[in-house]
Image: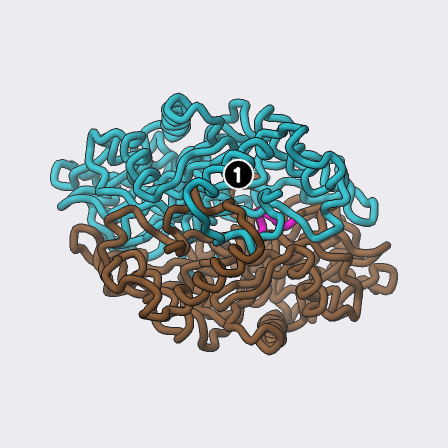
Chain colours: A cyan, B brown
């Protein structure tokens, strides 16, 4: 019986007449929907797959890695990342419509458990959250920061307006606090914005993620998760990776407290940022420059669907952060310039 | 003609008699190997796919995103992540043998362009790089740090021995500089080590990555990349993500200097850490606790294969780092305790 994960190498690309293919697809749908008649109940791979898929449908924890012999046979479920090209997203465009077009152009359809990674830039663009630098009036503070860090004073002003606090900077970039994140230039981006415009993060990323997820769930009648992704730098690393600035429809952090390690000892660092892992994987495929890949479909990610998690369930207080707790307090707080 | 990316949804799971499947596979191999007879030279998707694959084989830059009409049709190549279970890796075990077993148990084979993500812990284990806390003699400095940061003095001593510098800490964790990285506890791990042992990073991660890559290339006769992955925390984020502590066989950072954005302006932040993106994707599937998934096969990642890149081609000097440049100088340098 062809089922995901079994006999991968020989079945994957096999063709067949249209009738054959439809027949095979129908059989697959039966087995994937967990029909107990359609697969042998004793095959540990199928048992595991069925429980795993059931856990996605019901929003329960996935089956224990120990529940099945399958894991001892080297079997695990794979993850697929589909980068989806889109037409340029313009202010006022429906992001849902753009996503549906991109998905259909890639000849894919949505499934239960899919996570849709969306570039923060296109969320802001579609919401019209764009700032024209020509219309920005600068304060003395912005002009001072501009001189000190070799930035356009108008750009420094937008960064200040968006920031909750400013820690300092290096040439061209301020280290700011924004929605609980320690991020370059408050997340304001000069790339891929028209003319003299810059693009801040969405005004309320969490609400945007919720809105996109609801629209997609309605459209596809599937349980889908959404993560809004921006590029960020991390300490001492050259180059950017992905950051989940908001997510909806899945639990962003896996908590292993109380779980013991392979030798039965209590595990100390117990939290695993699934949302950032998904964002990192998606950002690998989203372009930084000329490419227009605002969406990545992530299929098979090991997440727990459902529930409502606020974006600050992904962040730490400054005093508990290994990095930020070592810095002097921010030099500029919102009250100084707000 | 069945080819990757075309008619995905209907072909993917199609079965067929063994003869049919073999025939289909043979046809696919022909088209995948770029035989100009086997696919229409005018189909932009196939042209793009052929150029992309050729660029992987030859180690050249992938074809420009603009070279083909394919991108305007929503087509991009997908990435697959295959988590590979393994038996417990014990000191002295051959990591190559464990990987080959895990790959074969998952019924997969290696292909040109595959990147193998390996957990740093199993690299250290196989190299016997384990420290028994019972045999550690503590200095006054380690005992002081242990008291201040609520750590076992023996563990603090191992962290000190591994560190190039110590910036400070939060309860249970020191912020250290190690091989150019700002990392918790010098990367020393108490999880999944036997008895009272702890596991530092491999003694020379870059050399380990090189060695693993050469062994796998010899075994499979394919051009494969290797990345060694550890979990790390990042500023103000709850939970760990993946960090590439070393890589071999591909260019870890994509440099877009000189490239212009969609509106023709020069792009400012131009570096994209592909190695960390791959590590983040892989760590999503590697377990933190009971799971034993030390390998993830990453297929289709948009990297440039070949060349020799040292691990410090992935890091920044402290003075150029947005985060670390804001901190006071490290309180303890190697000379103080080395």
Give x and y (percent) for residue A79.
Answer: 53, 46
Which of the 4 image quadrants contains residue B116? bottom right
* On screen, residue B208 above or below B196: below
The crowd level at tag 1 (other Cα within 10 Å; few <14, some 14-19, many 20+) is many
Is the stretch drawn in magenta largely helix, strand or loop?
A: helix
**Quadrant of the snapshot with the N terminus of chain B:** bottom left
Q: Which residues are magenta?
A: B282-286
Q: Nearer the viewer, residue B122 or B99?
A: B99
**Quadrant of the snapshot with the C terminus of chain B:** bottom right
Q: Which residue is mark 1?
A: A318
* On screen, residue A202 above or below A13: above
Give x and y (percent) for residue A6.
Answer: 62, 48
Residue A121 can be seen in this image: yes
Q: Nearer the viewer, residue B221 or B43?
A: B43
* Residue drawn 30% across the image and 56% down it: B45
Q: Label 1 is found on which chain of the structure?
A: A
* Residue drawn 75% across the image and 53% down it: B190
In the image, residue A149 lies in the stretch drawn in magenta: no
Q: Nearer the viewer, residue A30 or A143?
A: A30
* On screen, residue A10 above or below A48: below
Give x and y (percent) for residue B131.
Answer: 79, 64
Secondary structure, mark 1, is helix
The total of numbered circles placed on residues is 1
B165 with respect to B25 (left or right): right
* Residue drawn 40% across the image and 56% down it: B3
* Residue drawn 67% across the image and 32% down it: A51
Give x and y (percent) for residue A239.
Answer: 40, 58
B99 with respect to A140 (left or right): right
């Amino acid at each position: 019986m062809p089922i995901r994960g079994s006999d991968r190498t020989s079945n994957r690309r096999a063709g067949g007449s249209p009738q054959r293919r439809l027949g095979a697809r129908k059989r697959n749908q039966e087995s994937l929907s967990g029909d107990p008649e359609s697969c042998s109940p004793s095959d540990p791979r199928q048992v595991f797959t069925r429980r795993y898929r059931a856990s996605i449908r019901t929003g329960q924890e996935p089956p224990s890695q120990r529940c099945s012999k399958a894991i001892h046979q080297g079997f695990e479920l794979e993850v697929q990342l589909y980068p989806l090209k889109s037409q340029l997203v313009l202010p006022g465009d429906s992001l849902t419509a753009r996503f549906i077009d991109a998905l259909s152009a890639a000849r894919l359809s949505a499934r239960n458990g899919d996570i849709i990674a969306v570039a923060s830039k296109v969320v802001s663009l579609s919401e019209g959250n764009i700032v024209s630098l020509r219309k920005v009036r600068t304060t003395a503070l912005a002009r001072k920061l501009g001189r000190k860090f070799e930035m356009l004073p108008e750009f420094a002003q937008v960064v200040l307006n968006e920031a909750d606090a400013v820690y300092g900077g290096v040439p061209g970039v301020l280290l700011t606090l924004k929605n609980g994140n320690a991020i370059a230039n408050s997340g304001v981006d000069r790339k891929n914005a028209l003319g003299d415009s810059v693009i801040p993060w969405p005004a309320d990323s969490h609400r945007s993620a919720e809105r996109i997820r609801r629209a997609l769930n309605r459209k596809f009648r599937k349980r889908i998760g959404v993560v809004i992704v921006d590029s960020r730098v991390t300490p001492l690393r050259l180059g950017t990776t992905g950051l989940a600035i908001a997510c909806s429809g899945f639990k962003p952090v896996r908590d292993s407290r109380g779980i013991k390690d392979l030798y039965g000892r209590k595990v100390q660092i117990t939290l695993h940022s699934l949302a950032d892992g998904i964002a990192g994987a998606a950002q690998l495929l989203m372009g930084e420059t000329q490419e227009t890949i605002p969406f990545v479909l992530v299929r098979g990610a090991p997440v727990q669907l459902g529930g409502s998690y606020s974006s600050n369930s992904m962040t730490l207080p400054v005093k508990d952060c290994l990095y930020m707790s070592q810095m002097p307090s921010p030099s500029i707080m919102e009250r100084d310039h707000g």
